[in-house]
Image: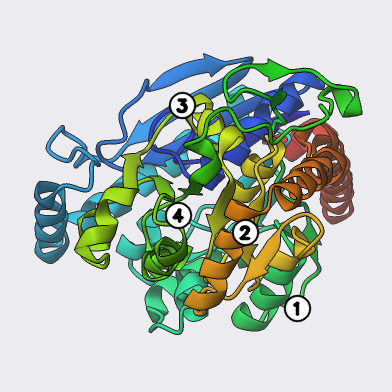
Amino acid sequence: MNLLFICNEYPPGRSGGIGSITRALARSLVAAGHQVFVAGLYAPGYGQADYEEDQGVRVWRRRFGLDIGLIRNDYSKTDTLLLELFRRSGLSRRDTVRSVRAFSVFVGELIGKFRIDLVEWPDFNEYFAHLPASFSWPALPVPLVVKFHGTASYIYRQMQEPVDQTTFLLEKKHMERADALVSVSRNTAENYASFYGLTRRIGVLYNSIEVPGVRTNGLSPTDDKAGGSAQTSDPAGIPSPEAARTIVYTGALSRVKGIHSLMEAWPLVLRKRPDAILRVFGKGRPSSLLARLPEQARNSVRFEGFVTKDRLYEALSGAAAAIFPSYTECFALAPLEAMAVGCPVIFTERVSGPELIETGVNGLLINPDDYGQMAEAMLSLLEDVEKRKTFSRNGRQTILERFDIRKSVKDHIRFYEELIINYQARMQRSDPNRTPAQNKT
């Protein structure tokens, strides 16, 4: 198959979960013998090469007209002021319409040039916020899959905040033009069906990751027997006394991810463990979060920004635990990555959390609004080595058995092949004189 993925955050760069899963899936599809192309319309200041090849994946990064170097995409006050100025002046909307239309033409050119069999497009596109309600997408000559990763409207609804109706309608219009809908978790599929009034079948293909080797010293991966990456006797081997008193958070510094709640819970941890350390990795500005902490607690929290995957795995592999107190998650990659390197995980009990964690078996589930429960969960792992070992072993085994991209890619291939066959049969029925080659033009 020749597959085209639409993605506006393909790594490297400050990518989120959609970028990471797209790269993992694309690389695995290439390894399985398919041709994979990725194209996206990137936020101003994202940077990186306009075109590159990544382990056989061909990647194009298209730019907005406003991306002339003024915006750095670094969460600075300058960026905030410029973006607001562009929005109020109407420049953002006009440029977005022009840029999205040009990008749609480019997608059509790729489909024709590389004889694409199928396009997968995420439900979430930042530029929807700047498109008018009247915007319409050109039809594609090949089947389109829209995958549910979490739209802006869905997240606002989950957070009980007002939903912009124009954005909501654009998101729904995007879904309605798809030939197939697929979600990254059962919970998300059910919630989307209700929220958007979808009556069509929604498939489920879980996010998965490239599973690294176990890191017994926080630095060096070791191979093991299970599925090509195996188990050591103690995958949570703690490399230093400091690591044994360290909790790690990875993710955007946003209220949706529960980082504000974590700041409220952290002083409760320090009351019993004043030596504890919280390391925070992720995109965003930490100033408002520091303001939530008592002055005496601030030295125990280290904001380390966006880092490479290797640095993140190094931090996770030795920590006492990783915590992800999200309010909403379609199916987060961050806890998968922590579990994959043997780091005990504390995850949200909400939305898709129970589809990953069986509390007390391979991790702990917590209510992000219950600061006391959150603190007790962290303390239990800081103080109980045997519990850490159990969660470490069981957590990694969960990833190897259920969320290894090498297994997930087989499910994706079956899904894509079935969709392509059904699409071509439908086109043939609508036009008996149409040849298979014409289905791509």
Q: Residue at x 56, y 61 (%)?
A: 379
Lower sequence index among marks 1 and 3 = 3
The tag on residue 85 is none
Residue 269 appears at what percent x and percent y? 45, 64
Asked whether the beta carbons under mark 4 and mark 1 sit within 8 Å of each other, the answer is: no
- Report the mark closest to the observer, 4 or 1: 4
Mark 3, other Cα within 10 Å: few <14 / some 14–19 / many ≥20: many
| Amino acid found under the numbered disc labelled 2 | Ile
Residue 19 position, x and y percent, is: 52, 39
| Residue at x-position 17% and y-position 41% | 71
The amino acid marked with disc number 1 is: Thr
Dot 4: element = loop
Mark 1 = which residue?
199
Write down the quadrant of residue 289 in the picture. Answer: bottom left
N-terminal label among 4 and 2 = 4
Picture quadrant of residue 253: bottom left
C-alpha separation, residue under disc 2 versus residue under disc 3: 37 Å
User: What residue lies at 15% left-to-right and 55% top-to-bottom?
Assistant: 80
Q: Who comes first in sequence, dot 2 or dot 3?
A: 3
Local secondary structure at mark 3: strand
- Left or right of 81 on screen, residue 361: right
Amino acid of disc 3: Trp
Q: Which residue is mark 2?
A: 346
Q: Which mark is residue 60?
A: 3
The residue pinned by badge 4 equals 125
Q: What's the distance in space between the residues labelled 4 and 2, CA to CA?
A: 29 Å
The local crowd at label 4, few if under 14, some if 14 to 19, many if 20 or more residues have their Cα within 10 Å, is some
Cα distance between the residues tagged 1 and 3: 34 Å
Mark 1 touches mark 3? (CB < 8 Å): no
Disc on the earlier residue, 2 or 1: 1
